[in-house]
Image (tube, rainbow, N blue to C red):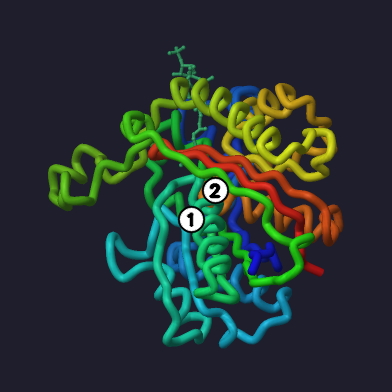
Amino acid sequence: MYAKFHSIGAYVPSKVLSNADLEKMVDTSDEWIIKRTGIKERRIAAENEYTSDMAAKASELAIQRAGLAKEEIDLVVCATVTPDYFNMPATACIISDKLGIRNVQAFDISAACSGFVYALSVAKAFIESGMKKHVLIIGAEKFSSIVDYTDRTTCILFGDGAGAAVISATEDKSEAIIDIHASADGSYADFLVTPAPGAVHPASEQVLAQGLNFVQMKGNETFKLAVKTLTQDVKNILAHNNIDSKDIPHFVPHQANYRIIKAVGDALKMSDEQVVLTVHKYGNTSAASIPMAINDIYESGRLKKGELMLLDTFGGGLTWASGLMPFAGE
Ligand code: ACO
């Protein structure tokens, strides 16, 4: 039994936070943000709109586009670092309930921006082992809930959103996911961290006073490592499968920073047409970034059945992952 990338869906909140808006909040400029990141605007969820709400909307679309009844989903995996609750129940359980799917295995994955590709590797393994037939995987973030909007080094980068995919069993090898490489190096854990709440820093007045509930990032160090790791990771997965970068119609990198995407694309000799870009309009949506980008090319008619997608991502942990597969949806 093989696993295929069966369908895609996404949800984007309606509220836009533009660079001009940020200019009024912190000491920054539209020019600096565009030059250093390529980001023009990002979306922010409503106050009473949570990660599970966005995820459920993306999932509804993905399940419908797979032509399945919700009852046919037998595993729900949600990748997020902005769950509805730290630390239980899992957001995947809440999403399942919102979808009306009961008595189904459901759990979360915490791998920051690499979460969706990590979830894809889990879905592939469950299906290939024969344990599950239709796995709903989700990347969803309300990143605005952990961003300090007085910190110009992080608040310009992140946005909210959700993407979902159904990964299904197939006996047809030609539509199967070809390969996934996922890895981590915890010695860089302090590059990207939200210190609280957790066992190290349980919630307290002191934690709030010190802003330990907000994301902290060593931006420049992360940037350099991201370019190096992402490039090597893609070279490895292509070489491992004897595929040339020119034969990839859709390179879908994690949307963290245009300069990172451009550097990796250039190192792989990819043309602009091959590289999928959404960072200008959504910013960095962490685990949601890759499925939102796939949905973007799907909805614009660029992604056709059978065409190869190369996914590549890097994030907190530090974690990184790449995946190679044909799009097997209609
Ligand atoms: N506006 C104006 N100036 C700013 C801003 C801002 N918003 N932010 C920083 N600066 C200043 C700094 O203070 C610094 O000033 P100084 O030279 O006087 O000290 C200067 O700009 C340069 O700062 P750097 O941090 O060196 O800028 P850099 O070019 O590295 O860009 C950025 C910063 C955009 C954060 C970049 O480093 C980056 O994209 N990093 C990688 C992010 C990433 O890939 N993360 C992983 C995934 S995220 C996840 O897993 C959740």
- Which of 46 and 55 lies nearest the eye of the viewer? 55
At label 1, the amino acid type is Glu
Tell me if 96 is positioned left or right of 135 in this view. Answer: left
Say which quadrant the N terminus sits in. Answer: bottom right
Tell me if 306 is positioned left or right of 222 in this view. Answer: right
Which residue sits at x=44%, y=29%?
153
Q: Is residue 256 above or below residue 225?
A: below
Q: Quadrant of residue 311?
A: top right
- Which of 61 and 6 lies nearest the eye of the viewer? 6
The crowd level at tag 2 (other Cα within 10 Å; few <14, some 14-19, many 20+) is many
Which residue sits at x=78%, y=53%?
297
Residue bearing the label numbered 1: 141
Residue bearing the label numbered 2: 285
Asked if residue 160 shows in the view, the reply is no
Q: Quadrant of residue 280?
A: top right
C-alpha distance separating marks 2 and 1 = 6 Å
* CB-based contact (under 8 Å), mark 2 and mark 1: yes
Asked if residue 306 shows in the view, the reply is yes
* Secondary structure at numbered mark 2: loop
At label 2, the amino acid type is Thr
